[in-house]
Image: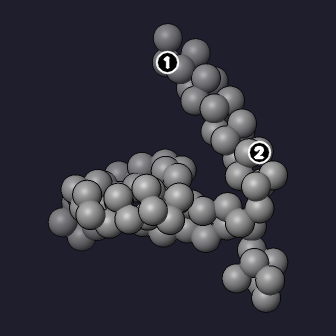
Amino acid sequence: MEKIYGAKYCSLHVRRTNRGAFGLYNDVLKYEINSVTPAYYADGEDAYDMRFYFDEKDRDQYRIDKAAREIKEAKEAA
């Protein structure tokens, strides 16, 4: 995907209750939670929107941007 399509990352959704799939993607394949998508599945269950960045620089920038968003959201909620 990276070489042929120029993709920066690969994304997928995982049920919040699917600990096996979450462990595989997060612990083994190093995907990170981007966000939670409420009621993603037909039965109303939420999903983790997960991403794996191919390039380490893009991965680092993603983490910085995500932390900045979380700080901003926390300040707005306060």
Badge 1 element? helix
Q: Position of residue 30 (x, y in %)?
A: 53, 58
Q: Position of residue 43 (x, y in %)?
A: 18, 66
Q: Position of residue 40 (x, y in %)?
A: 34, 62
Which is more toward the observer, 13 or 31?
31
Is residue 5 shown above or below 30? Answer: below
Residue that sits furthest to the left in the current view: 43
Q: Residues within 10 Å of mark 1 (few under 14, many from 20)?
A: few
* Residue 40 in view in this figure: no
Residue at left offset 72%, top offset 36%: 64
Residue at left offset 44%, top offset 56%: 26
For residue 61, the mark is: 2
- In the displayed structure, does residue 42 sit left or right of residue 47? left
Residue at left offset 75%, top offset 78%: 2
| Dot 2 amino acid type | Gln
| Dot 1 amino acid type | Ala
Residue at left offset 53%, top offset 20%: 74
Badge 2 element? helix
Q: Earlier in the sequence, mark 1 or mark 2?
A: 2
Q: Residues within 10 Å of mark 2 (few under 14, many from 20)?
A: few
Query: In whole angstroms, how far apart are the C-alphas of marks 1 and 2?
Result: 24 Å
Is residue 50 shown above or below 64? Answer: below
For residue 77, the mark is: 1
Residue that sits furthest to the front in the current view: 28
Task: Name the quadrant containing residue 53.
Answer: bottom right
